[in-house]
């Protein structure tokens, strides 16, 4: 049963933009930390997933992978229990399945993609050169 519902993936040329959305549809409050992972085509092992970004409920505590800093922006709407990932200046190497993740953590300092245990089903982002 889906707990996190993603949308917004698609195909764009290099330099283009996409905005991903993910909503926590659970009845209980379960996601003060939310974020995104990605897994590139042809990679299957858990160690090949890349934590892209995360954001705590305060909206100020954020994390970005070096590979996306300056191009991607994570944000959230707490009232809608939704996290967004605005992706600009997309590159072919950004092509991947993007997974939303969320969890309830005791401290903002713990909020990072690696700390998140609940995952969505993924949305595909394809960037052509």
Image (cartoon, grey):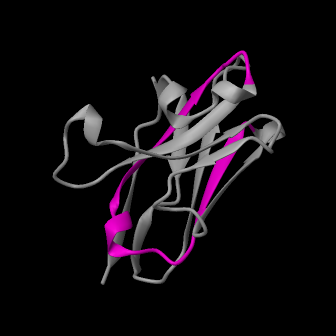
Image point (62%, 36%), residue name? 34
Name the residue nearer the viewer: 16 or 4.
16
On the image, the x and y values in percent for residue 103 come to 60, 23
Number of numbered tags placed on the structure image = 0
Residue 128 appears in the picture as rendered = yes
On the image, the x and y values in percent for residue 53 come to 56, 47
Image point (27%, 33%), residue name? 46
**Residue reaching furthest left?**
42
Image point (30%, 84%), residue name? 129
Segment colored magenta: 81-107
Residue 118 left/right relative to 75: left
On the image, the x and y values in percent for residue 66 come to 50, 57
Q: Quadrant of the N terminus?
A: top left
Q: Is residue 91 above or below residue 109?
A: below
Q: Name the image quarter holding residue 23.
A: top right
Q: Is residue 124 above or below residue 59?
A: below
């Amino acid at each position: 049963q889906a707990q996190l519902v993603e949308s917004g993936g698609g195909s764009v040329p290099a330099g283009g933009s996409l905005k991903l959305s993910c909503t926590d549809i659970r009845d209980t409050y379960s996601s003060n930390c939310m974020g995104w992972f990605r897994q590139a085509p042809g990679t299957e092992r858990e160690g090949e997933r890349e934590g892209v970004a995360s954001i705590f409920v305060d909206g100020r505590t954020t994390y970005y992978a070096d590979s996306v800093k300056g191009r991607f922006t994570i944000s959230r709407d707490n009232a809608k229990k939704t996290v967004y990932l605005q992706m600009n200046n997309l590159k072919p190497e950004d092509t991947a399945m993007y997974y939303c993740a969320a969890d309830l953590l005791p401290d903002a300092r713990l909020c990072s993609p690696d700390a998140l245990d609940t995952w969505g089903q993924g949305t595909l982002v394809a960037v052509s050169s």
